[in-house]
Image (tube, grey):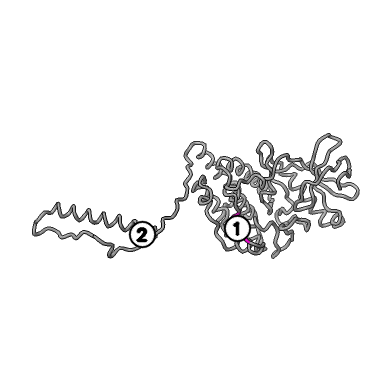
Amino acid sequence: MIGRVLNHYKILERIGRGGMGEVFLAEDTSLDRKVALKILPEELSANEERRERFEREAKAVAALNHPNIVTIHSVEQAEGVQFITMELVQGKRLSELLPKGGMALSKFLELAIPITEGVSAAHEQGITHRDLKPDNIMVTEKGQPKILDFGLAKLGLKTIASPGSELPTEAMTGEGRIVGTVSHMSPEQAEGKSMDHRSDIFSLGVVFYEMLTGQRPFRGDSPTAVLSSILKDSPQSVTELNPEASRDLAKLCRRCLAKDPTRRYQSALDLRNDLEELKQDLDSGALEALPVLPRRRGRPGVGIGVALALLAAAIGVFALLSLGDSPDALQIRPLTSFEGMAWGPT
C-alpha cells in the first residue's frame, strides 16, 4: 500500500491500526497537505455489511464536529478500495505521555476536562465509543487531546464493529459477545451484556486512573484474569499511589469505576462539571492534597485506650480534690488499667 496513489492521495507510511482497518499517512496532492487515511482492508471491501459499517463510522464522527474529536474530511473510493480521509493529528498518544508515578494534578485536569467534553459531545449525538483507552487519545503538540478511532462505536441501537481490530480488541456484535479492549472494558462489556454511554464513563475512569497513578486499576496475567479483576476487584485508591491526588478526586475515580452502571456518573457532562469544579478549587488553592499516612503497627486500639485511660485518671483526681474528705464525698476510682475497655481498629 505504501507509495500507492488513491484518487489524489499518495500513501506515504503506515501509522496505526484501529477498530476498522489500517491508518496511513498520506499527501493530499490537490490541496498540498498531509492527511490520515483509514483504509478498509481489501478482503473486507466486498462485504456489503462491512462497507455500510465503515460508512456509518465516518458519518457518525463527521457529524460530531468537536475540537477534541478527530475531524473527518471525506469518505471516498478508488480502485476498489474504500477509505476515510481525516485530519492528521501531530503529537503523541496519551499512552506515551503517562509518567510512571502518575501525572501532576494540574496536568491531569488540563487533559481530563477536554477529553470528557469530547466524550460528552459524542454521547449527545447518541454515539457510544466503546473503546476508550490512552492509545485512542492523541495529544497535539499544543497539548490538546483528540479522541480517535470510533471503529467500535455504537450508534443508538446499531453498532459499528470489525474483525480487523488489533488484539486484545475483539470486535463482535450481538448479545453475549465481547466488544472492546480487555483492559479498559466496563463490567457489562466484559460479560457481553447490553451497554450504553455509561460504559464509556467506566472506561474513562480506567483512563483517569492510569493518568493519575501510572498503573491500570485492573490487572492480570491473561485477558481472562483481567476480565475477572474488572468484575470482582476494587482497585487501590489513587490517593495511596499518588500523594498529590485529593480525596475528592479519588472519589470521582471511584464513582466512574463503580461496577453497577446506576452508581456511576449518569452523564459525561456531569463528570465534566465535577472535574471543572476540582480545577477551580485547585486554581484557588482550596484543593489540597491529602496524602495517605502509613498505618501504625501494633495492637489496634492501644493509642486510643491509653488516651482514654489518662483522661479517666485525670477526671478521678480532679473529683477527689474537689470533694476533699467529706464523708458524703463520691468515691471515684481512677481507671488505671484497660479493664472494661473495648478494643477497636485505629
Which residue in the protein does label 2 denote?
301
For image coordinates 69% across by 39% down, the residue present is: 140
The percent coordinates of residue 40 (x first, y second) are 82, 52
The percent coordinates of residue 93 (x first, y second) are 69, 45
- Label 2 environment density (alpha carbons within 10 Å; few <14, some 14–19, many ≥20): some
Predominant SS along the magenta part: loop
C-alpha span from label 2 to label 1: 33 Å
Q: Quadrant of residue 306?
A: bottom left
- Of the pair 285 and 312, the residue shown nearer to us: 312
Farthest residue in the top direction? 32
The amino acid beneath tag 2 is Gly
Above or below, 332 relative to 71 = below
Q: Look at the image and say whether residue 323 sits in the magenta stretch.
A: no
What span is colored magenta in the figure? 216-220
The percent coordinates of residue 304 (x first, y second) are 33, 56
Which residue in the protein does label 1 denote?
218
The amino acid beneath tag 1 is Phe
- Label 1 environment density (alpha carbons within 10 Å; few <14, some 14–19, many ≥20): many
- Is disc 2 placed on a helix, strand or loop? loop
Q: Earlier in the sequence, mark 2 or mark 1?
A: 1
